[in-house]
């Protein structure tokens, strides 16, 4: 499957859109926002550029990106004001810094609904009283895969990416046999029944993709630049846990229920796999070390606190709406759009049922990486 041309979050603002179903991601990014803001302030203090350039990789079509940009801009402005008050002598600068502008580049795959973000810009700027902003703020889009070059060399000071890097560049080639058939039958990600070849193929794809990502970004960052990356991971060395892999397992079980009802054919499930990987802390550290362009200054693993009320809807329904907004493009391409309602109703039910037995705890990793 040509994931880069098919995969996209559900655009627009309707009930099933990403913009209306991404509060879990926002909540999680907000939990570690203080670390992100501190990182960009340190970058500003180290580099004191006249134009500070930053990028949000995998910005999607929701408003999560603009909300974070607003906070990042504010943090840079605060750091700049501090240097103005303290003067050049008290910092590492030789002369007084002058920050004229902050440039923000929004990146996602070309299939992303960038227009939804652009349409929200007038309101965003109005709120921020654009004409009076000092430093000025500019927003542009840079479509393309983050597994390819996106920016010129030494161009960016800061890179942010949230809930995007667990997406691989493709479904690992190693999961297919010599006839091109998936060897991960009945599963859509690494599951208990997956043979070792499947695990090896996914882990290898992650290593290739992540080190390529690090190499490309180190070329695009200026000396003194940093990245903050937030993405899904796993707690221990075992791939099978009650976290992200279990959520995929429940989606696979939902497909199986639809097969038993005659709504989809078994062969369709056998040939469906996701281009996702939840790495462990050890795998991340190893790849950063091997690639060699970055110093990992901070790595944190955390869980999203579960909302108690959830606006009157169950946790299962909230998770199902989130996963639907993310997976709808791939699932409808492979199985057809007609199964979506039935599939995600079943999934919501399974998530609730499992939650009543034992908690499901998806892990998120936050990394702060300084260019060496
Ligand atoms: N950062 C937003 C959106 C996360 S959704 C938030 O926190 O809410 C993940 C996004 O990553 C999607 O929009 C998806 O299209 C994008 N993405 C996945 N793989 C990508 C790639 N190779 N290059 C660029 N964007 C990618």
Image (cartoon, grey):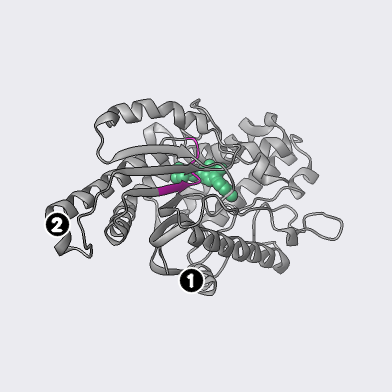
- Residue at left 42%, top 59%? 222
Q: Nearer the viewer, mark 1 or mark 2?
A: 2
- Residue at left 32%, top 53%? 49
Q: Please report the bounds of the magenta region as a residue range.
A: 54-61
Viewport quadrant of the C terminus: bottom left
Classify 240 as above or below 252.
below
**Which secondary structure, mark 2?**
loop
Q: How many marks?
A: 2
**Which secondary structure, mark 1?**
helix
**Residue 323 within the segment the image draws in magenta:** no
- State the image coordinates of residue 6 (x, y, percent, origin top left): 67, 39
- Residue at left 76%, top 35%? 262
Quadrant of residue 308 within the rendered picture: top left
Using the image as rendered, state which of residue 27 and residue 100 is in the foreground. 100
Classify 350 as above or below 357.
above
Disc 2 target residue: 87
Is residue 301 visible in this depiction of the protein? no
- State the image coordinates of residue 53 (x, y, percent, origin top left): 39, 48
Going from N to C along the chain, the mark reached first, 1 or 2, is 2
Disc 1 target residue: 285
């Amino acid at each position: 499957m040509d994931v880069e041309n098919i995969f996209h979050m559900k655009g627009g603002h309707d009930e099933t859109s990403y913009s209306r179903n991404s509060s879990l991601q926002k909540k999680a990014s907000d939990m570690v926002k203080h670390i992100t803001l501190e990182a960009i302030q340190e970058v500003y203090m180290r580099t004191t550029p006249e134009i500070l350039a930053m990028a949000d990789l995998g910005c999607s079509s929701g408003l999560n990106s603009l909300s974070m940009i607003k906070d990042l801009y504010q943090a840079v402005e605060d750091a700049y004001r501090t240097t103005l008050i303290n003067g050049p002598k008290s910092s590492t600068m030789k002369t007084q810094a002058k920050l004229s502008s902050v440039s923000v580049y929004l990146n996602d795959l070309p299939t992303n609904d960038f227009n939804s973000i652009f349409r929200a810009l007038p309101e965003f700027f109005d709120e921020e009283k654009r004409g009076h902003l000092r430093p000025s703020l500019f927003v542009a889009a840079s479509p393309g895969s983050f597994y390819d070059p996106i920016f010129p060399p030494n161009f960016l000071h800061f890179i942010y990416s949230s809930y995007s890097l667990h997406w691989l560049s493709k479904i690992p080639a190693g999961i297919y046999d010599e006839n091109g058939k998936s060897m991960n039958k009945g599963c859509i990600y690494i599951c208990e029944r997956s043979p070792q070849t499947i695990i090896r193929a996914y882990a290898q794809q992650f290593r290739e993709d992540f080190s390529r990502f690090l190499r490309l970004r180190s070329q695009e960052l200026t000396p003194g630049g940093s990245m903050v990356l937030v993405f899904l991971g796993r707690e221990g060395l075992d791939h099978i846990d009650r976290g992200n892999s279990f959520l995929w397992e429940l989606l696979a079980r939902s497909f199986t229920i639809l097969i038993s009802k005659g709504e989809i054919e078994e062969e369709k499930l056998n040939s469906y796999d996701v281009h996702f990987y939840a790495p462990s802390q050890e795998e991340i550290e190893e790849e950063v070390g091997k690639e060699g362009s970055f110093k990992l200054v901070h790595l944190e693993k955390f869980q999203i606190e579960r909302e108690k009320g959830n606006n009157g809807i169950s946790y299962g329904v909230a998770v199902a709406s989130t996963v639907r907004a993310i997976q709808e493009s791939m699932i409808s391409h492979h199985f057809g759009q007609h199964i979506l309602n039935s599939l995600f109703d079943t999934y919501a039910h399974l998530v609730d049922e499992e939650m009543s037995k034992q908690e499901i705890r998806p892990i998120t990793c936050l990394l702060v990486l300084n260019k060496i």
